[in-house]
Amino acid sequence: MPLINARELRRMYAGMGRQKCVTHLRESLQAKHLKPTDFSIRDLAESLIVDRQGDPIGEEFVRAMDPRKSDGDDMQTMLEAVDSAAFKNISGQLIYTTMLDEYEMYMAPVEKLYTNEPTRFNGEKIPGITGIGDEAEVVEELKPYPSVGVGEDYIETPETKKRGLKIEISKETLFFDRTNLITERARKVGEWLGLNKSKRIIDMVLGVTNNYKWKGTAYDTYQTTTPWDNVVASNGLANWSDIDAALQTFAGLTDPHTGEPIVVIPTAILVHTSLAATARYILNATQIRVDPNANAGTQQYQAYVPNNYMVPGNYEVISSPVIDARYTAGSVTTTNWYFGDFKRAFSYMENWPVQVVQMPANSYEEWNRDVVAGWKASERGVEAVRDPRRTQQNTA
């Protein structure tokens, strides 16, 4: 699709008015009917910058940036006279759309590994009530119901952190129409925010970082002894029997307060890419041949069993190059695989999602550094282990 030139933008602005034009362009970008690459930063400025009375002066504004045709006083007078709100709103939406697309691309592989939990706290102590177990008793007619007691239970999540970057449009960027430079910067911001967050979440799921704190005591996510055992040793992923062994481990977990079984319904398998094909053929096979005496050389029978009898459930296979890189960075053996209900095991405690804030008009930066417009992008939160018993590590 060709660029939307200045003439089209001016015609749209004149026909629809400022507010409707800005809203229309923003909604078209959000719906992806238009792309950031359909616009020129200079054309936006020439079309959408007006004076205080609403008359277009964008071309004059851009020409005033040429030091050969104006002096510093002319430029300052122009800056004080213009209304650049429409230009900043649309160019800000271009930057936000470009940044968010890149951010979501990096976050997509890990979205199923955690639950997003909005919070107003900078780290919190999340209370719970211990289960009472099988305390139900027979109540005879007209007899009072027996009382039961409950114990205190809580976890503590880490402090949240703010992360962000800023993007600026300088006088030179606008004058020389370096649209590609602006969109590339926006992509880099989205990439950095998305990559950083996904790396932190993957490291938590792999057990490279451990931040679970239960009733005042810090624990590693994956334990081989009490108060829970969620490491299945010598269980490399090769066939249905390995998934069965993992399910048996889940079946053996009990509530630490009551001794009753914990019901864990796994939803996904996390693997290094080298195991992704193996995981998919195990889960998608239509039949399995059972031959209990093949190794002994005294075969007695073979049975063909539907795969869903041997591998119950519908498990999603999760893998990506970003996950592979975290295996390597954390010195995690590539044959290790992870199984469980990840969304109930892990959370992201979010103070605020990715947001873009515009630099105020007539700021010091305009005078000091020739910044025509600027935006800062940030997000604040922290990854947290909520219930490690709902996930497990399988080692080969």
Image: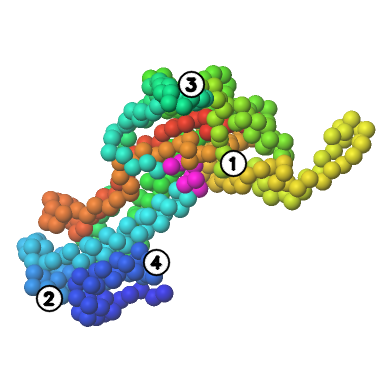
Magenta region? 109-115
Alpha carbon distance from label 3 to label 4: 52 Å
Residue type of the residue flagged with mark 3: His
The residue depicted at 30 percent of the width and 76 percent of the height is 5
Q: Disc number at residue 269?
A: 1
Magenta-drawn stretch, dominant element (helix, strand or loop)? helix
Q: Nearer the viewer, mark 3 or mark 2?
A: 3
Question: How far across and down, in percent of the image, does residue 64 sit?
Answer: 14, 68
Q: As rendered, which of 113 and 102 lies closer to the eye?
A: 113
User: Are circles 3 and 2 on residues that touch, CB within 8 Å?
Assistant: no
Which quarter of the figure is the N terminus placed in?
A: bottom left
Q: Residues within 10 Å of mark 4 (few under 14, many from 20)?
A: few
Alpha carbon distance from label 2 to label 1: 60 Å
Q: Residues within 10 Å of mark 3 (few under 14, many from 20)?
A: few
Reading the image, the residue beneath label 4 is: 32
Location of residue 174 (image quadrant): bottom left
Query: Element at badge 4?
Result: loop
Left or right position of 374 against 144: left
Q: As rendered, which of 176 and 226 lies closer to the eye?
A: 226
